[in-house]
Image (tube, grey):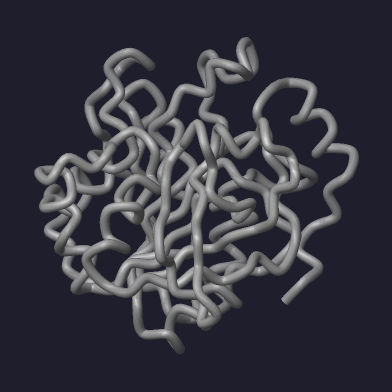
Amino acid sequence: MKCLILAAGYATRLYPLTENFPKPLLKVGDKAILDWLIDDIDGAGLVDEYIVISNHKFAPHFLEWAEKKQQKVTVVDDGTCSNETRLGAVKDIQYAIDTLKLDDDMLVIAGDNVLDFSLQRFVRYATEKQTSCIMRYYEANEQKLLKCGVVTVDSSDRILRMTEKSPTPETHWCCPPFYYYTRKDARLVQKGIESGCGTDAPGSYIAWLCMQTPVHAMEMPGKRYDIGNLQSYEQVQKEYQGITLY
């Protein structure tokens, strides 16, 4: 299994902290955000390569960081240099697939998330379902729902519908940026793009995919810390106690 880490954003809301430094490498506690994610996932023993998809501006930072990791880490530079010229998450995924000629099951995650639970549970869930999978959590705040991917699921967790940033969310099940693609479904990303699925938000591909083939949504077992601005970063620094739920 390959783990694709989406890290090509510019985190403009965290300026000046991220003006010349990538958000996923910011420290939370004694480790960079990416270290928390990779070191946790690696405990499952199922991922044989971690692929960080970066923009051109921050690629040197990721390359320097990757040299110190014990795991096999490959950095892919998507060639973009500004927030205005970014490819978007779905096109970044396809860019990595094309560049490295990937043909495998894939765990696809945003590289700027801090969690108090282990992603190993999600990997096990997806392996048991034998379909592509996502996670979901209940979001009571209706204003926040307008900015998220939202899913409708049946009693077996199968996704019936998914929308990204809908003005009229159908449910309160919100989707964080953690995805598992089966090898078969990873081969369909380009078809999804050609069929007109959105390419900026990573969940847009799942919104298209779930209408083609079964996709399941596991309820998130813990908390995700959203680092969207300087204030929230400071809050995470004070509150975060590591991964406590396995």
Regarding residue 75, the answer to whether it shows in the image is yes
Q: In this view, does 135 lie above or below 216?
A: above
Q: Which of 197 and 182 is in front in this view?
A: 197
Q: In this view, does 202 lie above or below 88?
A: below
Residue drawn where x is 27% and y is 47% of the image = 93
Task: Pinpoint residue 40: horizontal percent, then vertical percent.
Answer: 61, 67
Regarding residue 35, the answer to whether it shows in the image is no
Instruction: Please identify the residue farthest to the right as the structure is shown.
Output: 238
Residue drawn where x is 40% and y is 58% of the image = 161
Residue drawn where x is 64% and y is 17% of the image = 17
Instruction: Please identify the residue farthest to the bottom as the structure is shown.
Output: 128
Residue drawn where x is 50% and y is 68% of the image = 153
Task: Pinpoint residue 130: horizontal percent, then vertical percent.
Answer: 36, 85
Left or right: 162, with 220 as reference point: left
Q: Which of 28 and 139 is in front in this view?
A: 139
Asked which quadrant contains residue 144, the reply is top right
Left or right: 181, with 21 as reference point: left
Task: Pinpoint residue 168: horizontal percent, then vertical percent.
Answer: 52, 37
Q: Nearer the viewer, residue 61 or 98?
A: 98
- Position of the N terminus, as image quadrant, is bottom left
Asked which quadrant contains residue 73, the reply is bottom left
Q: In this view, does 137 lie above or below 213?
A: above
Task: Pinpoint residue 228: horizontal percent, then vertical percent.
Answer: 65, 28
